[in-house]
Amino acid sequence: MLIKKWELIKIFKINTAIKIILFLIILTFFLPFFVVSCGEQELSVSGLETATVIKNGNYVVLDGNPAAFILIIPAAILLILTFFTGKIKEEIKNSFFFKNIFMFAAVFNIFAAVTIRIAAQIIINKEIAGLHRGLADFVTFRAGYGFILYIILNAALLVLSGANYFVNLRNNLLE
């Protein structure tokens, strides 16, 4: 029994895909976001550690910045919101902002992630330069796979929500 292409699209709705992507975005926050290395030593830092405290074993390397929670809060709120859309008033549902909230969130998340990555690199370079000026030249700072997945998943959220917007726009024009 073969499932035809359009039947598969009906089964796998865009809203389900958006929920899955939002859940995966939240999970990436617990994966290595940044990797700092100096010679043979390497330190992976998750998004959660970026927001709380960065440790290497029992040694606290750097206090985190709670502002990094901004990376997970929009996805968590939107994921919860997707389960209650039936209870939201029609006037709110039909507003431009609400119809495009996933696109706005994806753009915001990507911008926030890139900003936090740049800020984290500046802070770490400043801390290292404070310890020893010559050491900063040997330290590398790069994005971890959690950060890369975070960006990719937000880009996918942007594409899906954009496609959903244009499909709804076309449907409204055809009515």
Image (cartoon, rainbow, N blue to C red):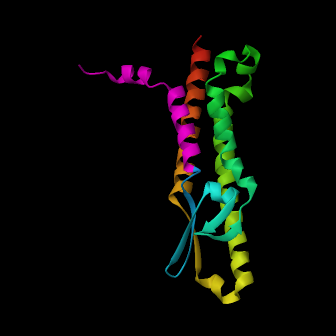
At x 70% / y 87%, what residue is drawn?
Answer: 133
**Does 171 sit above or below residue 23?**
above
**Where residue 16 appears, x then y in whole percent?**
51, 28
Taking depth in this image into account, of 31 and 143 the one nearest to the observer is: 31
Quick check: can you spot residue 94? no
**Does 32 sit above or below residue 80?**
below
Q: In the picture provided, is 147 more to the left or to the right than 77?
A: left
In the rendered image, residue 39 lying in the magenta stretch gets the answer: no
What segment is highlighted magenta in the picture?
Answer: 1-28
**Does 125 sit above or below residue 52?**
below
Which quarter of the rendering shows the C terminus?
top right
In the rendered image, residue 9 lying in the magenta stretch gets the answer: yes
Taking depth in this image into account, of 38 and 10 the one nearest to the observer is: 38
At x 68% / y 72%, what residue is drawn?
Answer: 124
Q: Splitting the image into 4 quarters, where does residue 174 fall? A: top right
Quick check: can you spot residue 141? yes
Q: In the picture provided, is 63 more to the left or to the right than 16?
A: right
**Where residue 142 appears, x then y in whole percent?**
56, 67
Q: In the picture provided, is 17 more to the left or to the right than 61?
A: left
**Where residue 105 appears, x then y in whole percent?**
67, 39
At x 65% / y 45%, what residue is drawn?
Answer: 72
Taking depth in this image into account, of 168 and 26 the one nearest to the observer is: 26
